[in-house]
Amino acid sequence: MCNDERVQTWRTDHFSEATTSTGITSGKMDAGAEVDVDRPVEGDSSAESVPDQDHGGTSEPLSLKQGEILRTLATVEKDSQAIAESFSSLFVSLRSTLAEATGSSVEHMSCFGDAAGRLQETALDAATKGNRYINSCLRLNEEIKGVENLAARLKHLRRNVDVLDTAVNKLLRPP
């Protein structure tokens, strides 16, 4: 079935003619919109040059208009097909981009998980070393307390040695 036959079939299925009380033939679409079929289109020389001749209730400009309508419908159909292909291409592109973004997000989440795991290990290691340092400082503090007692005893012993040295010097060197 060629385009003209499809458009003609569509036209007969969806477009019916009605004559108004003024004698103007108008078309009604199934959706309820009305189109004035006899009204000439601006710049259409074919409609102006052919006189109205009555052939069983239809005029020759009507058949010219119907041909124009059929050509317009064929153009609309081609445009609709092009738009559908464009949307299809757009959706394929969007699907591809979304898949790429999702894959990238999965990789980033994996990388983030690895980094968080390593950070946790490092923080645990640092906390363990920090606890060792604190314990070493506490032991050193306890040892220093013992050294302070020893230092006090040494100071006292030093005074006694100095007193003894002074006494020996007095005895060995008479005044």
Image (cartoon, rainbow, N blue to C red):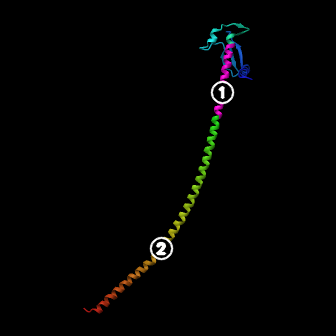
- 119 shown above or below 9: below
Label 2, label 1: how far apart the Cα atoms are: 87 Å
**Of 130 and 66, which appears nearest the observer?**
66
Indicate the amino acid at tag 2: Leu
- Please indicate whether residue 121 sits to the left or right of residue 144 in the image: right
As helix, strand or loop, the secondary structure at mark 2 comes to: helix
Picture residue at 36% right of the left edge, 86% below the top: 161
Most extreme residue toward the front is 2
x%, y% of residue 150? 43, 80
x%, y% of residue 174? 26, 92
Picture residue at 64% right of the left edge, 11% below the top: 47
Q: Which residue carries the number 2 mark?
A: 140
x%, y% of residue 131? 53, 67
**Residue stretch rendered in magenta on the structure:** 63-88
As helix, strand or loop, the secondary structure at mark 1 comes to: helix
Residue 105 on the magenta segment: no
